[in-house]
Amino acid sequence: MLGKLMKYEFMAMGRIFVPMYAALIAVTIISRLLALLPHSAPIIIGTTIASVLVGAVGVITFILIIQRFMKNLLSDEGYLMMTLPVKTDSLILSKMFVATIFSIVSFLVSTLAILVLSSFNFAYNFQLLGAWLSNLEGRYLLVLFQALVIVILAIFGSILLIYTCMSLSMLVNKRRGLMSFGVFVGITTIIQIIVAIATTIFAINHTFDYTRFVNMSYFAIGQLVILIITTIALIQYAVFYFITRYMLKRRLNLL
């Protein structure tokens, strides 16, 4: 059932994203072709339009992530969605996975457009990148892979945070948008305070063997940092997920 929910979510979001991506790519290509002309006016116009579209892709991605969750699960459509013979987990995960995929695609398409507009030499730079990767030690390739995983987890976490804020807004019956924003500010502030306290405790903890830490290799230190970041992130995201799940399953309050 999760696969079917994701399929329909892809179709619903794709109706907006695919034409938007196509328009951005088309305008970017036209702008590069205009750059071959001797006149500067068409180049400026094309580049301006492409730049606006790049910004629009990011804004629309963010808005659509909010709109799909709010409209499907927290408003009138929620009466239908919540009566489907599917688990609450499937409803949340389907939207989170699809939102994450489109967020990544939006970033890649926008980055590609910026590189094309900046006259990026793809053949030469990819050749350099390939040569660099081929000479890179296996352990550093592992670090690159881990960094990619952390970035994907960060996207998951950001989307889950948005879902959590919107879900907690069901505690009130009016001005839920304002409530969601207030919850977002509150959660992010609490996280920053906890991180600051934990860092301070770690810094003044005289029982920690700093000598052993200093004597570790850069790779070992990197692995330790990655492990700490990943563990903290997973705990944080698990809290977000179960709050969202609890609100949708136990405290559902549709408009």
Image (cartoon, rainbow, N blue to C red):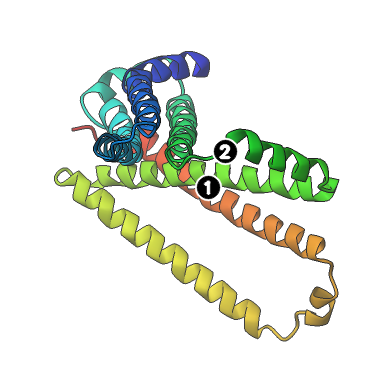
In the rendered image, residue 89, in percent from the top left (x then y), is placed at 48, 29
Which residue is outermost to the left?
Answer: 174
User: Is 178 placed above or below 173 here?
Assistant: below
Q: Are marks 1 and 2 in contact (CB under 8 Å)?
A: no
Badge 1 is on which residue?
Answer: 154
| 175 to the left or right of 44 | left
Q: Which residue is drawn at 82% across and 49% down?
A: 139
- Under tag 2, what secondary structure? loop
In the rendered image, residue 167, in percent from the top left (x then y), is placed at 33, 41
| Mark toward the viewer: 1 or 2 | 2
Q: Give the Cα separation between the discs numbered 1 and 2.
A: 30 Å
Q: What residue type is labelled 1?
A: Ala
Nearest to the observer: residue 224 or residue 54: 54
In the rendered image, residue 199, in percent from the top left (x then y), is placed at 58, 74
Q: What residue type is labelled 2?
A: Asn
Q: Which of marks 1 and 2 is nearer the N terminus?
A: 2
Q: Residue at x 75, y 83 (%)?
A: 207
Label number found at residue 18:
none
The quarter of the picture where residue 44 lies is: top left
In the rendered image, residue 146, in percent from the top left (x then y), is placed at 69, 46
User: Is 195 placed above or below 146 here?
Assistant: below
| 81 to the left or right of 200 | left
Nearest to the observer: residue 224 or residue 255: 224
The quarter of the picture where residue 32 lies is: top left
| 86 to the left or right of 210 | left
Q: Which residue is drawn at 28% across and 36% down?
A: 39
Quarter of the figure that contains the C terminus: top left
Badge 2 is on which residue?
Answer: 121
Which residue is outermost to the front?
Answer: 38
- Under tag 1, what secondary structure? helix
> Callout 2: 10 Å neighbours few (<14), some, many (20+)?
few
